[in-house]
């Protein structure tokens, strides 16, 4: 059975959600962040050298990195669901969105978090960081229509992968000027599989 090494309040929540969407049985191995440092516990390094979550095990196979985990699960267990066929004109767009989340969008959001802890010392960096956040969110907001998804009318794994971007942005107050993204996030979080994942995964600070 697939085991999800699940860290509270982390990107691993979207792996639980994906497995619920696919209807694939899985087991949760829970980990808690340090109450002082908010870092993952050292026990995660017993599973993968980076000591980060999400990590899954599927038999003897260990898979890390959110995008890689999602692509692996969808390809192996999706039976054609949640991704366009490789012959589809949407396939390359799907790949771009899958890599956009961690390759582009999350970096300025993380910088805003860390630089914000510097107080006034970090202020000179704010215009560049906030400008990049606005650039990425504007791009996403313009790529979808109200009621649609990143690939048009079809919900896909790319929406799951990018959900954490939207959740992190909303938590920091960055989504208020992007109505299409607020609408998309509300619809994603209302999906029955998303709600089931919350019930199984425990408290999740990014859920609204």
Image (cartoon, rainbow, N blue to C red):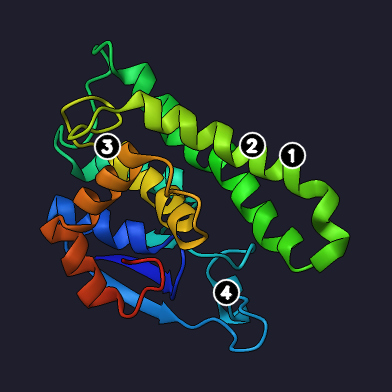
Q: Nearer the viewer, mark 4 or mark 1?
A: 1
Residue pointed to by mark 2: 132
Residue pointed to by mark 3: 75
Between the residue at mark 3 and the residue at mark 2, the CA separation in whole angstroms equals 32 Å
Residue contact at pointers 2 and 1, CB within 8 angstroms? yes
Between the residue at mark 2 and the residue at mark 1, the CA separation in whole angstroms equals 6 Å
Instruction: Please tell me in which quadrant of the rendered image residue 128 appears.
Output: top right
| Disc 4: CA contacts within 10 A as few (<14), some (14-19) or many (>=20) | few
Between the residue at mark 4 and the residue at mark 1, the CA separation in whole angstroms equals 38 Å
Residue 200 in the image: state x and y as whole percent: 23, 76
Residue contact at pointers 3 and 1, CB within 8 angstroms? no
Residue 128, which numbered label?
1
Q: Earlier in the sequence, mark 3 or mark 1?
A: 3
Residue pointed to by mark 4: 46
Nearer to me, 177 or 190: 177
| Disc 3: CA contacts within 10 A as few (<14), some (14-19) or many (>=20) | some
Evaluate whether residue 208 shows in this view.
yes
């Amino acid at each position: 059975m697939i085991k999800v090494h699940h860290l509270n309040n982390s990107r691993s929540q979207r792996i639980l959600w994906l497995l619920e969407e696919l209807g694939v049985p899985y087991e949760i191995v829970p980990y808690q962040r340090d109450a002082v440092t908010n870092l993952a516990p050292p026990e995660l390094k017993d599973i993968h050298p980076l000591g980060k979550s999400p990590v899954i095990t599927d038999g003897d196979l260990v898979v890390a990195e959110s995008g890689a985990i999602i692509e692996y699960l969808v390809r192996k267990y999706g039976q054609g669901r949640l991704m366009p066929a490789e012959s589809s004109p949407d396939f390359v767009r799907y790949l771009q969105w899958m890599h956009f989340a961690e390759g582009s969008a999350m970096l300025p959001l993380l910088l805003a978090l860390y630089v914000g802890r510097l107080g006034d010392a970090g202020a000179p960096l704010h215009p560049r960081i906030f400008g990049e956040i606005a650039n990425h969110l504007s791009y996403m907001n313009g790529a979808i229509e109200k009621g649609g998804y990143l690939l048009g009318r079809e919900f896909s794994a790319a929406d799951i992968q990018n959900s954490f971007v939207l959740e992190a942005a909303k938590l920091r107050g960055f989504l208020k000027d992007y109505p299409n993204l607020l609408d998309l996030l509300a619809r994603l979080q209302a999906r029955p599989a998303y709600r089931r994942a919350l019930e199984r995964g425990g408290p999740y600070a990014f859920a609204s």
